[in-house]
Image (cartoon, coloured by chain):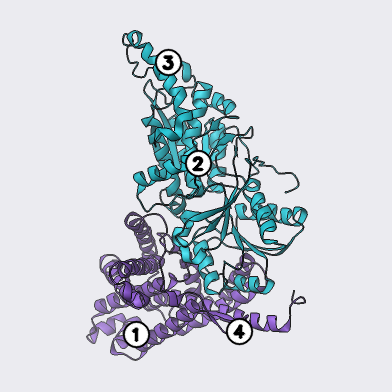
Amino acid sequence: MFGDYSIGDLGSIFVMQGFAGLILFSVYVLMALGLAIIFGQMGVINMAHGEFMILGAYVTWMTSNIFQSYLPGLFSGYFFLAMILAFLASGALGMVVEWVLIRHLYKRPLDTLLATWGLSLMLQQAYRSVFGAREVGVELPQWMLGSLHVTDSIEVPINGVFVMGLTVLITISVAYVLYMSRWGRQVRAVVQNRIMAGAVGINTEKVDRYTFGLGCGIAGVAGSAFTMIGSTGPTSGQLYIVDTFLVVVFGGAASLLGTIASAFSISQTQSTLEFFMSGSMAKVLTLLAVVGILMLRPQGLFALKVRK
Amino acid sequence: MSDEANKGLLSPLRRKLLMGMAAVPAITMLPRASFAQAPATSAVNTTGLAVTDTEVTVGILHSATGTMAISETGSIEAEKLAIEQINAMGGVLGRKIKFIQEDGASDWPTFAEKAKKLLVNDKVAAIMGCWTSASRKAVLPVMEQYNGMLYYPTFYEGLEQSKNVIYTGQEATQQILAGLNWIAKEKGAKTFFFIGSDYIWPRTSNKIARKHVENVLKGKVVGEEYYALGSTQFNSVINKIKLTKPDVIFTDVVGGSNVAFYKQLKAAGIDLAKQPLLTISVTEDEIDGIGGENIAGAYACMKYFQSLDNANNKTFVPAFKKMWGEKTVIGDVTQAAYLGPWLWKLTVEKAGSFDVDKIAAASPGVEFKGAPEGYVRIHENHHLWSKTRVGRAKLDGQFELIYETADLVEPDPFPKGYQ
């Protein structure tokens, strides 16, 4: 298939394709991080993860509308505020959900699957009633559109670079919070042994609530960032949920490193295959590979002990 | 809607009304004859449909919930508007239209079940409904078994024809061929890159498009790619487009994927003002989500744009906005859905009966002069004769009409040489 093209063309396409893979990688990590925290640290299967993301997207949409109407001068910077608001909104909703619903189900992990699935349906209908069934278009500031012109044939999408930067920032922050901070130590202590952690004076209920809130908040930020590359509608969250679970399960449920390694291998496989065959075939082969590896390693790439 | 647009429709009615007025003294003696021109129920309804002396019931069957609600909401709105307008003009055969709305919930078995409920329990005289081909295929056996009448609004892949369905959208050859001819001539296009969502409509449409490009236009298809419904990552295929440098990108990507595709195309530095792109799946409804700035310059090929400049459309658009809000946009399918109740009304009046068999037989040749897209007529194969148009997307989310076929294009659901 390469016979007709010049060396220069091919070189730049491989560079571009490398970027495409990296962007996909960042998107997967960003999608999966919130879920990995909730699933890994708490053992809760959050089927409503996509809807928490879309809440972030709707918050971004509302923020952009408010800036356009009242603060048009500051529009170019609204996105940063929108991401913070998205984090707070999704995180707050997550904490409420944990308090109302999830905390009663900690001893029944499979029921959390059903309960959060029901929650996702309720949230979808709520979005439909509040924002309408049609998709909304989130207007982006001019500097976030278009691409960086490197050479005539190499152009780097700005939104891709933005997502990559955001992913690195959030991953480092999460790693820092979980592994360096006092609160992170408490979270890990609760994961390892809830009763002992309670006995030494850790408020385990509070830790649970904040962990769930953090996971949902990160989902909100991801949703906010994805307004640059995807659609915002009541059911858009469903577009992400399958890939998200794939990344988390393949990576090994409890491991941050596993999630990253899994996102990397799936995204690279997929984007390389997509280049050589059609999109649907690439997806099929990627999924087959994942299934094959999971049969050999049911615990995923990196496995840690999960709370039983 | 003002009377102006529907003079053609109103005049026979007026004549009947006048005749009726002349007969007022006699009629006042009859019990329950509230409409002068209304023929007796026993005469117009011999099969036990839900028709009374004053009312006739139809069904509306679309997804108001679930993933398809995004698309089907516009169709529901258009059908309700048409019914309200018909009632304001006196209804059908002197009977007001009452509708029962059922929710298909984006789930194909639910569509079939609700269609059965509408036909068997509610005895509706006609159903305005379905959107995706999958839902239509699920409903079709029910319509045929219980002898119902379905008015189906979406442009679709063809390869179907039924006594019990009137297809008010375009079938694939009607929609695609004229657009390809136009872009080949106008842009001197020789190479085409096809990209679509992976299900029956894009695959069939692209098959037809490929035959046309290769056999008729003597061009070349340099790529044909499909992505699963709901895919949100198109960077790899965009790289392939950059590598193959096609004269035209031809797309039938649908749903949420559409938004991702155009946003990423723009971000990858492909300027649609310089790189011609022809889509058959993006209407004004989709642009709402995509954002005008991401798709401005692309060409769309279908039969209706909200910006069409004709007398019918100039009354239709404000009436729609008055009923459903100033910000609502009207896409191709929404307009086709609006035709459903009108075509049914005209056919009932032509047949002089609500009976489904008589309506099916009377449908060919029924003309609707008040259609927002302009004059349409039902073909023997139950599809519509309609014009095909090419529009260019503008920043504000509307299309600017660039080209339209001189004559109505004949519907050809089983195209020879294209299968």
- Which is more foreground, mark 4 or mark 1? 4
- Which is more foreground, mark 4 or mark 2? 4
In the rendered image, the residue lying farthest to the bottom is A180
Say what amino acid the circle numbered 2 marks.
Ala
Q: Measuring 47% from the left and 39% from the top, which residue is drawn there?
A: B312
**Cα separation between marks 4 and 2:** 55 Å
User: If you read the primary sequence from the N terminus, does the residue marked by circle 4 or circle 1 appear first?
Assistant: 4
Say what amino acid the circle numbered 4 marks.
Thr
Say what amino acid the circle numbered 3 marks.
Ala
- Which is more foreground, mark 2 or mark 1? 2
In the image, taking residue A147 as reference, residue A217 lies left or right, namely: left
State the residue position of label 4.
Answer: A151
Are the residues at dot 2 and dot 1 in contact (C-beta closer than 8 Å)? no
Q: Where A166 sits versus B44, above or below?
A: below
- Quadrant of res B217: bottom right
**Cα separation between marks 4 and 1:** 48 Å
In the image, taking residue A186 as reference, residue A296 lies left or right, namely: right
Q: Which mark is residue B112?
A: 2
Q: Where B130 sits versus A58, above or below?
A: above
